[in-house]
Image (cartoon, rainbow, N blue to C red):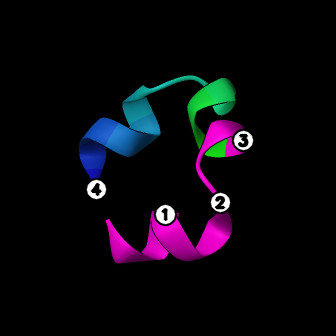
Amino acid sequence: MPCEARQPSTYVEMVPIPAKQML
């Protein structure tokens, strides 16, 4: 998930943990 790491912390905060794992 390189794109996710590239995105700011705000992106991770916006998306819940379960959704993040799904991605």
Q: Label 4, on which residue?
A: 1
Number of the label disc, if any, that sits on residue 20: 1
Local SS, label 4: loop
Q: Label 2, on which residue?
A: 16
First along the sequence among labels 2 and 4: 4
Question: Which amino acid does the dot numbered 1 rest on?
Answer: Lys
Which quadrant does the N terminus fall into? bottom left
Q: Are marks 1 and 2 in contact (CB under 8 Å)?
A: yes
First along the sequence among labels 3 and 4: 4
Crowdedness near tag 2: few (<14), some (14–19) or many (≥20) residues, C-alpha within 10 Å? few
Judge from the rendering whether residue 12 lies leftward or rightward of residue 23; answer left or right. Answer: right
Q: CA distance from mark 2 to mark 4?
A: 15 Å
Residue 1 higher or lower than 11, as above or below: below
Residue closer to the observer: 21 or 1: 21
Question: Which amino acid does the dot numbered 3 rest on?
Answer: Glu
First along the sequence among labels 1 and 3: 3
Residue 15: image x %, image y %?
A: 58, 49
Crowdedness near tag 3: few (<14), some (14–19) or many (≥20) residues, C-alpha within 10 Å? few
